[in-house]
Amino acid sequence: MRNFVGVLTIALALVVAAGVVAAQQSGSNSVPPPWAFGFATPLTPGAAAPPPPAAPAAPPAPDPTMHKLPGSQLSFTLNQIRDQYGPDTESDSRSVRSGGLVPRRSPSNA
């Protein structure tokens, strides 16, 4: 039984390998699909190059509107609100170290 499983495993591996080799050899003369490279139809020799892509749109101007929560004395722009590190609202209540105030950690002042 042990020999039979070994022979069956080797035979299956050879069949898979033969299938892979046959698939590779049959596709060597064919042209790659044009959709894989962003073309609707295959390019023919001597044909004009496709037009370049359009320029990206300009980013919108920042919104200067100040937003404020009811009961709060602070107001912030949308860019300040979306900042990953948040607006600096606690500069007066930071802990004091030997060198002074604890600096805010963000990529802009790291």
Image (cartoon, rainbow, N blue to C red):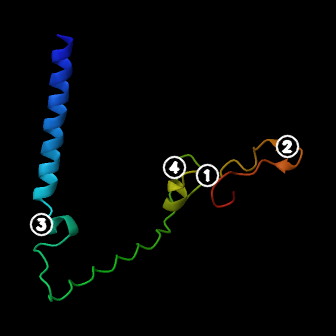
Q: Position of residue 19 (x, y in %)?
A: 12, 44
Mark earlier in primary sequence (2, 4): 4
In this view of the protein, can residue 77 be seen by the observer?
A: no
- On the rendered image, what quadrant is the C terminus found in? bottom right
Mark earlier in primary sequence (4, 3): 3
Q: Which residue is mark 3?
A: 29
Tag 4 secondary structure? loop
Q: Which residue is mark 2?
A: 97
Mark earlier in primary sequence (3, 2): 3
Decide which of 16, 99 is in the foreground and name it. 16
Mark 1 residue type? Gln
- On the rendered image, what quadrant is the N terminus found in? top left
Alpha-carbon span between mark 3 and mark 2 = 72 Å
Count residues near mark 2 (Cα–Cα under 10 Å), then give few for <14, some for 14-19, many for 20+.
Answer: few
Q: Residue at x 52, y 55 (%)?
A: 81
Alpha-carbon span between mark 2 and mark 1 = 28 Å
Mark 3 residue type? Asn
Alpha-carbon span between mark 1 and mark 4 = 8 Å
Label ID, residue 69: 4
Label ID, residue 73: 1
Alpha-carbon span between mark 2 and mark 4 = 32 Å
55 is higher (above) or lower (below) than 91: below
Residue pushed farthest right?
98
Tag 1 secondary structure? loop
Depth check, mark 2 against mark 4: the one in front is 2
Tag 3 secondary structure? loop
Q: Quadrant of residue 36?
A: bottom left
Residue 48 placement, left or right of 96: left
Q: Position of residue 2 (x, y in %)?
A: 21, 12
